[in-house]
Amino acid sequence: MRVFALSLCLLTGTALAPPQRRLGKVTAQRSAAGEPAPQPYALDDARPRSAAALAALATATMPLACYAAGPAWVEPVSNVLDPCFFLIQFIMLLRVIISWFPETDVNEMPWVLVCAPTEGLLKITRDIVPPSFGVDISPVVWIAVASFLREILLGQQGILVLMAQGRM
């Protein structure tokens, strides 16, 4: 038990100690103009040691730089599509709620703001999926379509999100 406690103290002591900086040696050379010799620098520094090292570093990171960010059009398109999909879902949800009250006159002022823009889309959907048993599911179809497209394009693993992160 004592050996375990002693080894634990030694390990934590070395793990918590700050790392020592190593200094490299630079050979003292003077140019023809008589410039002073460069000062030693830490070997842990990220500074390149020669022009060849700098060129190799630039060549090695060049492929990564072109994939670092997505195309420039992705963010503006995402900024337009996200509110559009939300608006479609919200208006269609309001349309579903209005359909629960059949005595509501949709040609009156507050309801016409919801019903007029959506009627064209709902008419196309009613031709494909006709209302049955007095239930019109065409707004629900559009909510599902808008939700699916929003998730595929703008979700956490959406196509436009991955393109903006440079992973696609």
Image (cartoon, rainbow, N blue to C red):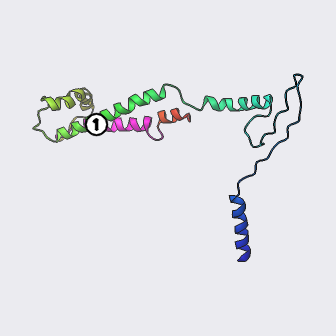
Mark 1: few, some, or many residues within 10 Å (few <14, many ≥20)?
A: some
Mark 1 residue type: Phe
| Image location of residue 1, percent across then percent down | 70, 77
Q: Is residue 167 above or below residue 13?
A: above
Q: Is residue 53 left or right of residue 139?
A: right
Res. 11 image quadrant: bottom right
In the depicted view, which residue is nearer to us: 142 or 112? 112
- Residue 144 position, x and y percent, is 33, 39
**Residue at x 17%, y 38% (from the top left corner):** 99
Residue 155 is inside the magenta segment = yes
Using the rendered view, name the quadrant where residue 148 is placed.
top left
Q: Secondary structure at mark 1?
A: helix
Q: Residue at position x 82%, y 33% from top?
A: 38
Q: Is residue 76 above or below residue 16?
A: above
Residues rendered magenta in the picture:
134-157
Is 21 situated left or right of 131 in this image? right
Q: Is residue 1 left or right of residue 155?
A: right
Q: Is residue 108 left or right of residue 9?
A: left
Q: Is residue 119 magenta?
A: no
Residue placed at 77% from the left, 42% from the top?
A: 42
